[in-house]
């Protein structure tokens, strides 16, 4: 008995020691939590009393971010589906202590991109769904990053940098905004490879775009919907392509789609006539969709447009005169200044938002931004960045046309027509404003909430390719 007891004693002692260790750990956790709550309470009292918003964000941001990131990672695809709602209809912006506010759609997109990149790094799998637009998009991101360093290294030493507070933060925020825009397209293309997801996105733009149109026509101040940028384009062109290309739609739905198109064009073309970037891209997209669908109907549309201009020539002459009175011819001077800056920094440009100090130093009395995304790109990212962007623009347009011709009749072909014609209109809009890549000193990064609209549809170039190829493979197996 004594021998048996002696043999069990070490086990009993081990259990007792383990129990004491667990008890000590519990007390340690309780004490840590107690002191943590006390510390956070003191910190909260300090930042609230001192109105230190950035300090509050630094302290409490990570605490809130950890459970939020965990929730997003568990419901990843659902969070991607939340992006159009967050961009179009959630008017929540995070204050930064400056004029700029961070839209919740940007925060969500950054979180999704960060989780995705971390996941790929942990799995050591950097594979993307194949698409000819992957390389130019990623190459443009790299060029933007290089231009940031290049612009700092080769910055003119006499620039008046003192008038720009935290300029490096502005540049980093711009770089993040551009990169996340491309990241949104890649997210959609790689995770939303189902016909129902595309229908959901198009439905969001039709429903919320209809509300935007109604609110603007009735002059209802709402402060909720983001009816800026290319909202008119991405409201009208899905309705138009469904009207002309999708088979089997009931006449009642066609009537509603036609009413939406007419109402939106009335608001953007007649009421807001001088805002060219609000309606010219839409008109170009309509012509592009018609030409791709049927060159005969395109000729009819062209003839109708010529007749309209001839009959209403007094109206159009007045429109041009009003535009000149508004200072439209002044843009040529703004573009000349931009090209002078580019002449000295032509390879990789001045960096994200980098040409602003040059304007304020060398042209302080005419320091206006270009309001032209193509000139913005060459000024910020140089010839290299511009060539890569043109590569991306051409590759994405060709891919959209190929997908339209490869897709079988039905919704996938209609969606391809929506994407390629809308993207053609969006590229045209770049001549009139910064509606694809928001410039930091025009819209600020808050403009992401409506510049991201176009990137949603760019992402569908990737997912449509996958769905069309999958449908072909299924048909081959069935044969």
Image (cartoon, rainbow, N blue to C red):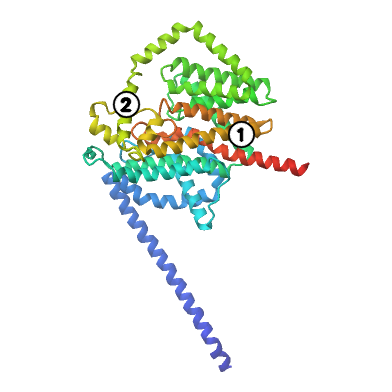
Residue visible at 44% across and 8% down in the picture: 315
Residue visible at 52% across and 87% down in the picture: 9
Task: Tell which residue pokes out farthest to the bottom in this image.
Answer: 2
**Relative to residue 1, is residue 104 depicted above or below?**
above
Would you say residue 89 is visible in this rendering? no
User: Residue 347: horizontal and vertical position, in percent?
Assistant: 36, 40
Lateral position of residue 346 relative to residue 296, left or right: left
Tell me the crowding category of disc 2: few under 14, some 14 to 19, or many 20 or more residues within 10 angstroms, Cα based. few
Q: Nearer the viewer, residue 144 or 391?
A: 391
What's the mark number on residue 331? Answer: none
Q: Which mark is first along the chain, 2 or 1?
A: 2
- Mark-to-mark CA distance, 1 and 2: 37 Å
User: Residue 281: horizontal and vertical position, in percent?
Assistant: 48, 24
User: Residue 276: horizontal and vertical position, in percent?
Assistant: 43, 20
Q: Which residue is mark 2?
A: 336
Q: Which residue is mark 1?
A: 402
User: Residue 289: horizontal and vertical position, in percent?
Assistant: 58, 24
């Amino acid at each position: 008995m004594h021998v048996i007891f002696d043999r069990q004693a070490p086990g009993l002692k081990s259990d007792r020691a383990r129990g004491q260790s667990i008890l000590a750990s519990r007390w340690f956790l309780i004490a840590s939590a107690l002191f943590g709550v006390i510390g956070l309470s003191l910190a909260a009292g300090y930042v609230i009393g001192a109105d230190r918003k950035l300090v509050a964000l630094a302290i409490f941001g990570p605490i809130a971010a950890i459970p939020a990131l965990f929730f997003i990672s568990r419901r990843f695809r659902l969070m991607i589906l939340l992006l159009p709602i967050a961009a179009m209809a959630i008017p929540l912006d995070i204050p930064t202590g400056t004029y700029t506010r961070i839209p919740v759609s940007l925060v969500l997109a950054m979180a999704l991109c960060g989780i995705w990149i971390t996941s790929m790094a942990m799995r050591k799998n950097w594979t993307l769904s194949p698409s000819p637009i992957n390389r130019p998009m990623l190459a443009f991101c790299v060029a933007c990053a290089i231009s940031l360093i290049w612009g700092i290294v080769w910055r003119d030493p006499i620039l008046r940098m003192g008038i720009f507070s935290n300029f490096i933060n502005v540049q980093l925020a711009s770089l993040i905004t551009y990169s996340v825009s491309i990241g949104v397209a890649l997210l959609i293309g790689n995770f939303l490879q189902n016909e129902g997801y595309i229908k959901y996105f198009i439905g969001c733009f039709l429903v919320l775009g209809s509300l935007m149109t109604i609110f603007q026509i009735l002059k209802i101040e709402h402060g909720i919907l983001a009816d800026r940028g290319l909202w008119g384009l991405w409201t009208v062109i899905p309705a138009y392509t469904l009207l002309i290309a999708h088979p089997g739609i009931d006449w009642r739905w066609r009537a509603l789609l036609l009413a939406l198109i007419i109402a939106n064009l009335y608001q953007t073309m007649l009421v807001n006539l001088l805002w060219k970037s609000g309606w010219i891209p839409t008109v170009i997209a309509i012509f592009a969709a018609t030409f791709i669908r049927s060159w005969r109907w395109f000729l009819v549309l062209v003839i109708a447009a010529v007749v309209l201009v001839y009959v209403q020539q007094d109206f159009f002459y007045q429109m041009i005169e009003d535009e000149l009175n508004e200072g439209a011819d002044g843009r040529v001077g703004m573009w000349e200044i931009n090209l002078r800056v580019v002449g000295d920094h032509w390879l990789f440009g001045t960096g994200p938002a980098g040409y602003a100090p040059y304007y304020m130093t060398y042209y302080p009395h005419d320091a206006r931004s270009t309001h032209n995304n193509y000139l913005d790109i060459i000024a910020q990212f140089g010839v290299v960045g511009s060539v890569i962007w043109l590569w991306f623009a051409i590759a994405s347009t060709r891919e959209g046309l190929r997908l339209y011709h490869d897709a079988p009749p039905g919704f996938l072909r209609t969606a391809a027509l929506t994407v390629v014609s809308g993207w053609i209109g969006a590229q045209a809009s770049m001549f009139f404003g910064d509606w694809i890549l928001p410039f930091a000193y025009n819209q600020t990064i808050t403009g992401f909430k409506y510049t991201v609209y176009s990137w949603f549809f760019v992402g569908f170039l990737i997912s449509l390719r996958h769905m069309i190829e999958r449908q072909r493979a299924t048909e081959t197996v069935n044969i």
